[in-house]
Image (tube, grey):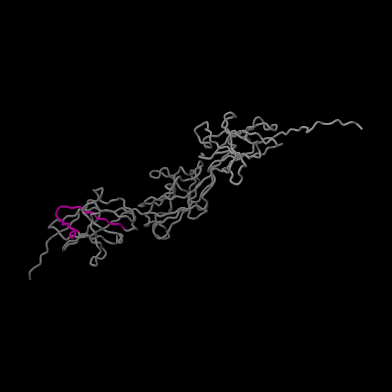
Amino acid sequence: REATHKPNVTVRALLTAEADDDAVVPSPAVSGRPVRVKVSVATSGQDATDAELWIPDEKIETNRAVQWGTVTDQTQAKWCDNTTSTAGYRVCGLGTGGLTLTGTAQTIYVWLTPLNTTVGPLNMTARLVATDFAHDLVLPPIIVHGVFSASAYAPIAAVWSGESFWVRIRVSGTGWTVGAEHLRIASSKVVTGSVKRSSTWNAFSNLEACWTGSGGYSGYTVCTLNPNGTLDASTSVGLIGPDAEQETWVYFTPATTTVGSVFASSSSGFTLSAAYYEDLTVYVDLTVSGLLDPYAGFRPAEVLPSHAVAAGTPVRAHWGVGSTGSSGSNEALAIGVDKVEPGTVRYGFADSWAESTACALDQGWYSTTCRGCYYVCNLTASTPDSYAVWSESVTRHVWLFFEPKNTTAGELNATVRFTADNFVDGWDVPFVLVMGEMGLLEPAGVVEPS
């Protein structure tokens, strides 16, 4: 019987992934997004006109297109098909697409989407097939980064300076994490040593201290989300993954100089990270009200020319006001209209009536419930330094000039309020004693003895 001779044709892959910067683009890849993989192929014998490249379905998202081409322009790429005879693979017809494999290495590009649940290196072995031959082709390693999905919530979203927040972070991921699960916050946003975490809200006894970052985490306070190791002891899989949300609570005190929003914008907040994962920053709107202290310089307020004055005598009260942070708008003093003579209220940053500025009758800016009840001094005059009107860096000396109500006799009991946007009102009642005068309404008559 005549022997059948098959030609000795070998198809080989010349892998250049480690040498080429663009073997995988982009690198790292991101879960759910396509990548372009570059390989070189050639034969060591006769030409192959019917070569096919088989991409395994188990490593890719099968509902996303797989394409191949000889140039990096994907618009010129050809489709890879899924046929009954090649179940489990996407078949890229190199030969039917016009590519003949020869002894000279040729570059081809493959576009595919790694399996969404992949985290870390994706090692994929494809098949390079021609007549009477099939050859394993190890594709360049694809490093895939998972993607977090997370939300943040604060049961109490507004506090006074020096108070603390609880913030709940819920997070899931496209694939199970493989370690280094961390949450971080800029150290400039918090009181040093105040950041802690717990698996439950209000669990002060179970709080775990977070640590000051270094190296890549320099400038951050970092919380380890899984202090017990890489794997969740109850599931023996990564801590964060696609099956359910993980929940953690963060307890912290904002920096003492914080006034207004803790985070300037939605691009700042709590940042989640893990090995082979894209960082994700989650934002929650947290507000701190600053505090004003009229007694920061001295106590009680200085009242001139004296605490005790005759009715109709103008007085000036002087405070040294401290602040937990810097004000930015609507800094003001306010005093009730029932305590002062109309049109006599002025303010200044020096003990000089000539340099003072008139205050106006409130028309609803300070009090929306009692229009016309206050004289309001909008502190728009230039301060004697470069700091804000209220600032943690300076004790602000301010004078209020006014004439007590001339119908007053005895202690004035006038409350002076200090205010600004995002501040809790400070207040003081300077001691002013108004000495009333007595006189005769008509001349006294002479009483004759009886």
Q: Is residue 1 above or below residue 347?
A: below
- Quadrant of the frame with the C terminus: top right
Q: Is residue 117 magenta?
A: no
User: Is residue 240 or residue 178 the one in the foreground?
Assistant: 240
Q: Is residue 107 magenta?
A: yes
Which residue reaches farthest left?
A: 2
User: Is residue 433 or residue 324 the one in the foreground?
Assistant: 433
User: Is residue 424 or residue 407 the one in the foreground?
Assistant: 407
Residue at the image position 11 percent from the left and 62 percent from the top:
7
Q: Is residue 14 left or right of residue 341?
A: left
Which residue reaches farthest right?
A: 450
**Which span of residues is magenta-colored?**
94-114
Q: Quadrant of residue 367?
A: top right
Tally the numbered discs. 0
Measured as percent of width and height from the top left, residue 118 is found at 33, 57
Majority secondary structure of magenta residues: loop
Measured as percent of width and height from the top left, residue 245 is found at 43, 58
Measured as percent of width and height from the top left, residue 40 is found at 20, 53
Q: Is residue 11 above or below residue 189?
A: below
User: Is residue 1 or residue 350 the one in the foreground?
Assistant: 350
Measured as percent of width and height from the top left, residue 267 is found at 42, 47
- Quadrant of the frame with the N terminus: bottom left
Q: Quadrant of residue 102?
A: bottom left
Q: Is residue 38 left or right of residue 286?
A: left
Q: Is residue 232 left or right of residue 18?
A: right
Q: Quadrant of residue 115?
A: bottom left
